Image (cartoon, rainbow, N blue to C red):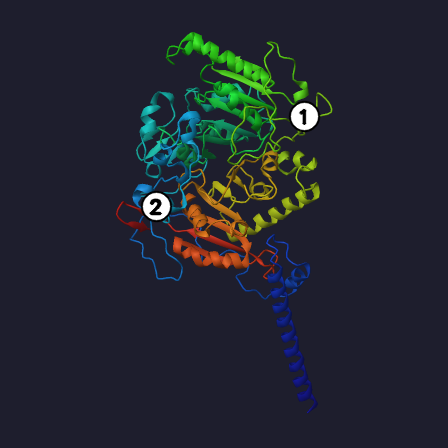
C-alpha cells in the first residue's frame, strides 16, 4: 500500500515538474517575443533558460533536410505552380531578361545628355514598375567556379557578341564555341593585365597589403580588377550601361565586383577617404571638364597617400595623337590642365613612362607645398559631411581632410596592412567619429558575426566555398559578415542603406572591404542574375514603413541567380510574413531558430531560388 502511495506521489511530482517546465518555456517565449530586440541579443534570463530547456517553435539550427543548395544547370519541363494563399507573381516578358530598372535605355534618352546626366540613375515611378519575375534566358547555366570564371563565361548567360567585334584588336573578349573567353587584355594593356599591374607595382605598394581597395572608373569588362584578385587587392569597378552592351554584366559573370555607374552630376556612392588607388584606363572621362570637377570627386574618395593612375588620352599623346584623331596642341593643352588640377589638389606626380602616369595624394593638406605656377586654389567644400554621397550633387571644391598635429601625420589615421587591417579597430572608430561605436563594441560585433557565419555554414555547407562567389550584404553595418567570410573564394558587396542612423561605410573600407550606399526602395545598379548569395539582416524591419515589401523581394529575385540562396535574419513576426510570400516568387524556404535558442525572437529564414528560364513563349524549369 505504501509503495502504491509513493508511486502516485512520484507521478504527481513528475507531472507538476513537467507543468512547471512547460510553463516556464511559454512564459519566457512570450517575454522574448514582447522584447523584440531584433539584434540577436535577446533577454539574458531567457537565454539561460533556453540553454536548459529545448522547447522551440521552429526548426533547430542544423543543416536543412528540405532545401537543396546544389546547382544543376539543366533544363526541364514546363513549370506548374500549385495553388497557394500567397500572391503568385507571373514571369515578365522575355524582352526583360536583362532589365535594369534604374538604367533603362529608353528612359535614359528622355534626360539631358549634358554631363552624362542621362547615364545616371533614373528609376521608374510607381505606376511604371514591373510587378513580375525577370526570367533567365533559355540555356542559362550557373557561372563557372572561380578562378575559371575569370577567363570564361557561358554564351547563353550573356548572349551578346558586339564586344567581340568592337574590341577585337584590344584583346577584351573572344567568342569560342559556346563560351566567351577573356584573355585579360584591355585598351591600354594589350599585353595583358598582369604585365600592366607589374608596371604599376614598380611605384604603388601593391604586393605588401598597403594598397588593398581600388576603384576602376570606366572599367570595361573589369580585367584590371579580375587580375588584381591574386594580388589580394579588392576592386570596385563601374561603367555605364551604354553602347558597349553588357560590359558590367560580363564583369559580374566573371566573378568580379562591378556596378552600373558613371561620373556625371552626382557624387559617387562611396564615402570619403575610401580607396587606396583609383585608375582610369582610357575610361573616356573628361577630367578637365567643369574646371576639374571629376578629379575633385576622385580626390574625395581617395585616401590620403592614395594613388591615381591615368593611362590613355592624353598620356603619351606624342605617340597616339594620330590614331586618336586629335591635334598635338589639343592633347598637350589637356595634359597641362590635368597637371594643374592635380597640383591644386595637392597630388604629387610620381611616375610617367609610356602609356602610364601616376599621381599620389599627399597624406595631409598641411604637407602641400606652395604652387609653383601661382594657381588659383579651389574653394574648400562647405558640406558638413563628406561621406554623405547618396543622390547628392557634386561640388567644385576640395574635400577637407581631418586635421593633423604634425606634417608627417596621416590625416584620418594610419591603416594596418591587409590582412591585419581586416579586424584591427579602424581609425574612424578610434577617433570617435561614429557615435556609440567604440573599440569594445566594434570587437564585440566582429566576434558576433564570426559566430553568426559559423552558424550559417552549419545550415549551408557551400557558404565559404566557390559555390557562392558574388555575395551581397543588404544591410552591412560594420562589415562583420563580410569580414567573417573573407577569403579568395568570394567577395561581398557591403550595402549601407541611406536611411540607417550611423553611416558605417567608411569603416567598411578601412577594414579593406568594399561597399556602396543604396536605398532599397529602389532597384540596385546591377543586371539581373548577378549574385549567388544575398544576406538580409534586419532589412525588412528597417524598411517596413517606408516602401512596399513586395518591391524589395522582387528586386532581390531580379539580382539573384537561379538556384542562388538568401539568408534573412530578422524578427520572427517579420519573417513569418516574408515566408508566406516566398512561394509566390518561386523560392523554397525554411525557418530556423537563432543560434542562442528558440526563445530569442530573432530568427533565421533561409531560401533558395528555383531554376527556371524562358524560351520566349513559356517558362521551363529543371
413 with respect to 270 (left or right): right
Q: Which mark is residue 552?
A: none
Q: Quadrant of the N terminus?
A: bottom right
Residue underneath mark 2: 135
Q: Is residue 425 visible?
A: no
Secondary structure type for disc 1: loop
Hey, which quadrant is residue 82 in on the image? Answer: bottom left
Q: Are marks 2 and 1 in contact (CB under 8 Å)?
A: no
278 with respect to 284 (left or right): right
- Closest to the observer, 42 or 395: 395
- Closest to the observer, 507 or 292: 292
Residue 214: image location, x then y, percent:
53, 29
Residue underneath mark 1: 410
Residue 331: image location, x then y, percent:
44, 11
The image shows residue 504, relative to residue 592, as above or below, that is: above
Q: Is residue 551 visible?
A: yes
Secondary structure type for disc 2: loop
- Closest to the observer, 433 or 124: 124
Q: Label 2, label 1: how many angstroms apart (C-alpha)?
A: 50 Å
Q: Residue at x 54, y 30 (%)?
A: 233
The image shows residue 211, relative to residue 327, as above or below, that is: below
Amino acid at each position: 500500500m505504501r509503495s502504491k502511495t509513493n508511486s502516485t506521489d512520484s507521478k504527481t511530482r513528475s507531472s507538476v515538474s513537467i507543468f512547471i517546465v512547460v510553463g516556464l518555456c511559454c512564459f519566457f517565449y512570450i517575454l522574448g517575443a514582447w522584447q523584440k530586440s531584433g539584434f540577436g541579443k535577446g533577454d539574458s534570463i531567457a537565454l539561460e533558460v533556453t540553454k536548459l530547456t529545448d522547447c522551440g517553435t521552429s526548426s533547430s539550427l542544423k543543416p536543412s533536410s528540405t532545401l537543396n543548395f546544389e546547382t544543376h544547370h539543366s533544363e526541364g519541363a514546363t513549370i506548374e505552380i500549385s495553388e497557394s494563399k500567397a500572391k503568385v507573381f507571373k514571369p515578365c516578358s522575355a524582352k526583360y531578361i536583362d532589365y535594369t530598372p534604374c538604367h533603362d535605355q529608353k528612359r535614359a534618352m528622355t534626360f539631358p545628355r549634358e554631363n552624362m546626366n542621362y547615364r545616371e540613375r533614373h528609376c521608374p515611378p510607381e505606376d511604371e514598375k514591373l510587378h513580375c519575375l525577370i526570367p533567365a534566358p533559355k540555356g542559362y547555366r550557373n557561372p563557372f567556379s572561380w578562378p575559371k570564371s575569370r577567363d570564361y563565361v557561358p554564351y547563353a548567360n550573356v548572349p551578346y557578341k558586339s564586344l567581340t567585334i568592337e574590341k577585337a584588336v584590344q584583346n577584351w573578349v573572344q567568342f569560342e564555341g559556346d563560351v566567351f573567353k577573356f584573355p585579360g587584355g584591355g585598351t591600354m594593356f594589350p599585353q595583358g593585365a598582369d604585365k600592366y599591374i607589374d608596371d604599376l607595382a614598380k611605384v604603388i605598394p601593391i604586393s605588401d597589403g598597403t594598397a588593398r581597395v581600388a576603384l576602376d572608373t570606366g572599367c570595361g569588362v573589369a580585367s584590371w580588377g579580375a587580375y588584381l584578385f591574386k594580388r589580394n587587392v579588392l576592386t570596385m569597378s563601374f561603367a555605364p550601361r551604354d553602347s558597349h552592351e553588357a560590359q558590367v554584366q560580363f564583369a559580374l559573370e566573371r566573378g568580379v565586383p562591378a556596378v552600373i555607374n558613371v561620373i556625371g552630376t552626382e557624387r559617387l556612392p562611396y564615402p570619403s577617404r575610401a580607396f587606396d588607388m583609383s585608375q582610369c584606363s582610357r575610361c573616356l572621362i573628361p577630367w578637365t571638364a567643369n574646371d576639374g570637377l571629376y578629379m575633385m570627386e576622385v580626390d574625395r574618395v581617395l585616401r590620403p597617400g592614395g594613388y591615381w593612375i591615368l593611362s590613355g588620352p592624353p598620356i603619351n599623346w606624342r605617340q597616339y595623337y594620330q590614331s586618336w584623331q586629335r591635334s598635338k596642341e589639343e592633347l598637350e593643352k589637356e595634359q597641362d590642365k590635368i597637371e594643374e588640377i592635380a597640383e591644386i589638389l595637392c597630388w604629387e606626380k610620381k611616375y610617367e613612362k609610356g602609356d602610364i602616369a601616376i599621381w599620389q595624394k599627399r597624406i595631409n593638406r598641411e604637407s602641400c607645398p606652395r604652387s609653383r605656377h601661382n594657381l588659383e586654389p579651389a574653394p574648400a567644400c562647405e558640406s558638413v559631411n563628406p561621406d554623405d554621397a547618396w543622390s547628392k550633387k557634386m561640388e567644385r571644391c576640395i574635400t577637407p581632410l581631418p586635421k593633423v598635429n604634425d606634417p608627417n601625420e596621416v590625416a584620418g589615421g594610419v591603416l594596418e596592412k591587409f590582412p591585419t587591417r581586416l579586424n584591427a579597430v579602424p581609425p574612424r572608430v578610434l577617433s570617435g567619429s561614429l557615435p556609440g561605436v567604440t573599440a569594445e563594441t566594434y570587437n564585440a560585433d566582429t566576434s558576433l558575426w564570426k559566430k553568426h557565419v559559423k552558424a550559417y555554414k552549419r545550415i549551408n555547407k557551400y557558404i565559404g566555398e566557390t559555390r557562392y562567389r558574388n555575395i551581397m550584404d543588404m544591410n552591412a553595418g560594420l562589415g562583420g559578415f563580410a569580414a567573417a567570410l573573407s577569403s579568395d573564394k568570394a567577395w561581398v558587396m557591403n550595402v549601407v542603406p541611406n536611411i540607417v542612423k550611423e553611416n558605417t561605410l567608411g569603416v567598411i573600407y578601412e577594414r579593406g572591404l568594399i561597399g556602396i550606399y543604396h536605398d532599397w526602395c529602389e532597384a540596385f545598379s546591377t543586371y539581373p542574375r548577378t549574385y549567388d548569395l544575398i544576406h538580409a539582416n534586419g532589412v525588412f524591419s528597417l524598411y517596413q514603413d517606408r516602401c512596399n515589401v513586395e518591391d524589395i523581394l522582387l528586386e532581390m529575385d531580379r539580382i539573384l541567380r537561379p538556384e542562388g540562396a538568401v539568408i534573412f535574419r530578422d524578427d520572427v513576426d517579420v519573417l513569418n510574413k516574408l515566408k508566406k510570400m516566398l512561394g509566390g516568387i518561386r523560392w523554397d524556404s525554411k525557418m530556423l531558430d537563432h543560434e542562442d535558442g528558440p526563445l530569442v525572437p530573432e530568427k533565421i529564414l533561409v531560401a533558395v531560388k528555383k531554376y527556371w528560364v524562358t524560351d520566349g513563349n513559356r517558362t521551363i524549369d529543371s
